[in-house]
Image (cartoon, rainbow, N blue to C red):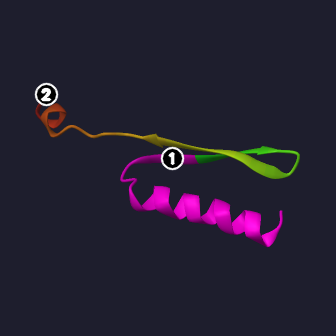
């Protein structure tokens, strides 16, 4: 990857990390390049702890 491409990927990942409390970030790679970034977020409900 070119440095400019890596910089763009890292900026997106940093932004996603700042807003993520529970979950995962997945990088999809094709031909050695990041083609997609996925964020799966879990939401923990407080009311479920009392059940």
> Is 50 situated above or below 18?
above
Q: What predominant SS class does the magenta segment belong to?
A: helix
Q: Where is residue 22 in the image (x, y as percent from the top left)?
A: 38, 48
Query: Which residue is drawn at the image coordinates 66% and 60% (left, top)?
Result: 9
- Per the rendering, the mark at residue 51 is 2
Left or right: 14 as drawn, with respect to 7: left
For residue 18, above or below residue 22: below
Query: In this view, which residue lies farthest toward the top?
Result: 51
Name the spot of residue 48 as percent of width and height, x first. Answer: 18, 32
Badge 2 density bin: few <14, some 14–19, many ≥20, Cα 10 Å: few
Name the image quarter holding the N terminus.
bottom right
In the image, is residue 9 part of the stretch drawn in magenta?
A: yes
As helix, strand or loop, the secondary structure at mark 1 comes to strand
Residue 51 against residue 41 in the figure, above or below: above
Which residue is rendered at x = 51% and y = 46% of the image?
A: 24
Name the residue rendered at 56%, 59% in the picture. 13
Q: Mark 1 points at which residue?
A: 24
Q: Quadrant of residue 18?
A: bottom left
Q: Position of residue 51 (x, y in %)?
A: 13, 27
Q: Give the range drawn in magenta.
A: 1-25
Question: Of marks 1 and 2, which one's residue comes earlier in the chain?
Answer: 1
- Residue 44 position (above or below residue 16): above
Q: Is residue 46 left or right of residue 19?
A: left
Residue 6: quadrant of the picture: bottom right
Query: Any magenta on residue 8?
Result: yes
């Amino acid at each position: 990857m070119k440095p400019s491409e890596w910089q763009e990927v890292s900026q997106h990942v940093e932004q996603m990390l700042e807003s993520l409390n529970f979950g995962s970030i997945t990088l999809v790679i094709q031909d050695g390049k990041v083609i997609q970034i996925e964020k799966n977020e879990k939401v923990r409900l407080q009311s479920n702890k009392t059940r």
